[in-house]
């Protein structure tokens, strides 16, 4: 039997690259795309015709859509129109779609971890674009799974979050870390494996997939610094009180639905990096 074909958008990125590597090892026939990075499958997801051509070429049975931009003038179109184009192409082919979203679709005011039944109410432009992307994807591909995750770290090389923390501890940057902003950081390998496990199910709709520990930005910085052999004494703390626009403070995710569905609990950052 020939292996199932998997298309990973954003295959040149941190999460997408890890998904490509792990899917390869798990027997999928994988196409990973890039945009600015040179490679065999470059595509701009904002270009509907280019996305259709990509799908005709890769003929995927399943798509894991990770491509996005965090900010900048192209972010809204990349995140919303790009996701809509990928969802429409996947639906037209009858391909399974796993769309990667974020905990920042929530406002962080609930004071408890968010479940899949909570309503998005993003406070920041990035979260607004990802919430709009979820809506656009659901309209075009009602059977898509919408995975909301949190700060991604680890894997081959360092994530942007880890690089920033080490820049601060090594004196290349000056930044204080929030003690009142809680997230559930997730190791990129654990997330990639969970996405591939989800690909083998028919689950549709939002699903929360993040690490088990809710930690502040400051605690994450201390864990990353220590794990990389640095001192934490000089890390400065701050709070997000008074910052305009308001930042989402507590975006911890309740991942019990994913744990029941996939039979996995993604380890927390304290377990992975702590002593
Ligand atoms: N990073 C986090 O902590 C975090 C937290 C929560 C959710 N997420 C979600 O996780 C997903 C992956 O994040 P990541 O950190 O792995 O991303 P990343 O490393 O920044 O990679 C982004 C990818 O998107 C591609 N891309 C950018 N613009 C594109 C366009 N117009 N057309 C096609 N591809 C384009 C990039 O290609 P080139 O580099 O080749 O240009 C790259 O492969 C995103 O959906 C994000 O919302 C991330």
Image (cartoon, rainbow, N blue to C red):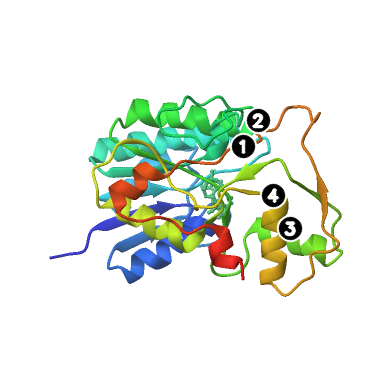
- Crowding near the residue tagged with mark 3, few <14, some 14–19, many ≥20 C-alpha atoms within 10 Å: some
Task: Give the CA distance from mark 3 to mark 4.
Answer: 12 Å
Residue beneath disc 4: 217
| Mark 3 sits near ligand 1, with its Cβ under 8 Å away | no
Q: What is the x, y in percent for residue 132?
A: 50, 27
- Crowding near the residue tagged with mark 2, few <14, some 14–19, many ≥20 C-alpha atoms within 10 Å: some
Report if residue 66 is visible in the image. Answer: yes
| Circle nearer the N terminus (4, 1) | 4
Task: Give the CA distance from mark 3 to mark 2.
Answer: 21 Å
Tag 4 secondary structure: helix
Residue beneath disc 2: 124
| Residue situated in front as seen by the camera: 94 or 59 | 94
| Residue situated in front as seen by the camera: 114 or 14 | 114
Q: What is the x, y in percent for residue 266?
A: 44, 56
Q: Residue at x 23, y 40 (%)?
A: 94
| Residue situated in front as seen by the camera: 84 or 213 | 213
Q: Residue furthest bottom?
A: 229
Q: Residue at x 57, y 59 (%)?
A: 269
Residue beneath disc 3: 164
187 above or below 108? below
Q: Are marks 1 and 2 in contact (CB under 8 Å)?
A: no
Of the 4 image quadrants, the one containing the N terminus is bottom left
């Amino acid at each position: 039997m020939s292996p199932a074909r998997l298309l990973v958008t954003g295959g040149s990125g941190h999460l997408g690259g890890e998904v490509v590597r792990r899917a390869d090892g798990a027997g999928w026939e994988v196409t990973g795309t890039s945009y600015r990075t040179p490679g065999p499958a470059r595509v701009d997801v904002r270009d509907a015709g280019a996305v259709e051509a990509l799908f005709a070429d890769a003929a995927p049975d399943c798509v894991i859509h990770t491509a996005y931009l965090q900010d900048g003038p192209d972010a809204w179109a990349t995140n919303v129109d790009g996701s809509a184009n990928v969802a429409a192409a996947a639906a037209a082919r009858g391909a399974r779609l796993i769309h990667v979203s974020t905990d920042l679709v929530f406002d962080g005011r609930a004071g408890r971890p968010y479940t899949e039944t909570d309503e998005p109410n993003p406070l920041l432009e990035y979260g607004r674009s990802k919430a709009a992307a979820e809506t656009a994807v659901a309209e075009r591909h009602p059977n898509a799974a919408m995975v909301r995750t949190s700060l991604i770290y680890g894997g081959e090389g360092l994530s942007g979050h880890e690089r920033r923390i080490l820049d601060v501890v090594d004196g290349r940057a000056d930044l204080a870390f929030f003690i009142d902003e809680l997230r559930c950081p997730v190791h990129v390998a654990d997330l990639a494996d969970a996405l591939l496990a989800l690909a083998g199910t028919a689950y549709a709709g939002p699903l929360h997939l993040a690490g088990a520990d809710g930690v502040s930005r400051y605690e994450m910085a201390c864990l990353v610094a220590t794990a990389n052999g640095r001192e934490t004494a000089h890390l400065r703390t701050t709070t997000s009180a008074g910052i305009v626009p308001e930042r989402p403070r507590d975006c911890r995710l309740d991942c019990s639905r994913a744990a029941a569905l996939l039979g996995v609990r993604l380890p927390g950052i304290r377990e992975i990096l702590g002593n």
